[in-house]
Amino acid sequence: MCSAKMICTFCIFVALLPTGLHHAVHESFDGQTNYHYVFKDMKSPMPRILHSRLERYDRRLLGIKMSPANGEWEFEMLRLRNGLKK
């Protein structure tokens, strides 16, 4: 059985959990970097990127740094027929 002390500790932790999640937002306009973060699993050639915007969140939970996460993103791209041409 759970003791009253364990239940009380759990309730305090759950109550403080939403207040302990802090994140900073960084906005990036670098097309190649943003493409890598959003479409890293795509095996096709990278298209020509005309414009991109990506919000990245640096997250912390109760002072512990967590992995960054993608937020909203937008891309304007041109598909190239024979891969990447310069």
Image (cartoon, grey):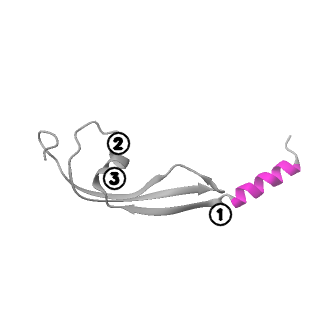
| Residue 73 coordinates in the image, percent (x, y) | 35, 58
Q: How much space separates mark 2 and mark 3, taking CA atoms?
A: 9 Å
Name the residue nearer the viewer: 55 or 17: 55
The structure residue drawn at horizontal position 36% and vertical position 49%, both measured from the top left corner, is: 38
Asked if the residues shown at circle 1 and circle 2 are in contact, with their CB atoms under 8 angstroms apart, the answer is no
Q: Which mark is residue 40?
A: 2
Magenta stretch, main secondary structure class? helix
Asked if the residues shown at circle 2 and circle 3 are in contact, with their CB atoms under 8 angstroms apart, the answer is no
Q: Quadrant of residue 71?
A: bottom left
Residue type at mark 1: give it. Answer: Thr
Name the residue nearer the viewer: 13 or 35: 35
| Residue 53 coordinates in the image, percent (x, y) | 32, 60
Given this view, does label 1 or label 2 mark the residue nearer the observer? Answer: 2
The structure residue drawn at horizontal position 16% and vertical position 47%, both measured from the top left corner, is: 79
Q: Which mark is residue 19?
A: 1
The structure residue drawn at horizontal position 30% and vertical position 39%, both measured from the top left corner, is: 42
Residue type at mark 2: give it. Answer: Lys
- The magenta stretch is 4-16
Q: Could you tell whether 32 is left or right of 1 in the image?
A: left
Specify which label sits upstream in the sequence, 1 or 2.
1
14 within the magenta span: yes
Residue type at mark 3: give it. Answer: Asn
